[in-house]
Image (cartoon, rainbow, N blue to C red):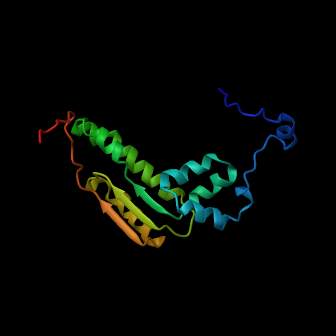
Amino acid sequence: MASNTWPEPDLKSCKSCGGTWNDGLDQLPDEVLLSIMSCLTMKEAARTSALSRRWRELWPCFPGTFNFEDPKTVLERSSLSDQAFFGQDTVNFVTWVTGVVDQHLGPAVEEFKVSFDLSNTYQSLIDKWVVFALTKGAKSLVLDFNPTYRIASTMHELPL
């Protein structure tokens, strides 16, 4: 039985390139990289900032869909009390959205979606988000501030 082994890396050639890895993407113009980034989700686009300084500088220009909703987080919140739900989670969410909006440097966004249970307490920030979306020429603006459906902490299987 043959074993699969990987060839040993040529450390001399790695050292000769200065220890930097170049995949060719860094040679592309910003417009092409932003076009690539626009095909990603907002979360994936944010992760590109870890690739290199150039990608980190491009992330604030992300032109795609700004989707501020995480279904997993909503499901995790379903087991919390109302007080906890409307407490720090809400502050963290509002801070996250406002931070992304404040740091965005690009001329446009494709879509802007916010889905979270928010009260009138945050009206001025919500207004700011709407102005941002309209100023950036968003083709779609979705604001859903309805209370989330709370799923019971235990799921039951129904007989068919």
Q: Please identify the quarter of the rendering in which residue 31 is found.
A: bottom right
Q: Please identify the quarter of the rendering in which residue 79 is found.
A: top left
Q: Please identify the quarter of the rendering in which residue 35 is found.
A: bottom right
Work out which residue is located at the far front of the displayed protein and give it: 1
Pick whichever, 15 or 66, lies toward us: 15
Pick whichever, 18 or 54, lies toward us: 18
> How many numbered discs?
0
Left/right placement of residue 41 relative to residue 13 reads left
66 versus 15 height, above or below: below
Residue at 26% across / 53% down in the picture?
A: 119
Work out which residue is located at the far left of the displayed protein and give it: 159
Which quadrant holds the N terminus?
top right
| Residue 123 image point, x, y percent | 31, 59
Left/right placement of residue 52 relative to residue 136 reads right
| Residue 155 image point, x, y percent | 20, 36
| Residue 128 image point, x, y percent | 41, 63
Left/right placement of residue 15 relative to residue 100 reads right
69 versus 136 height, above or below: above
| Residue 37 image point, x, y percent | 57, 60
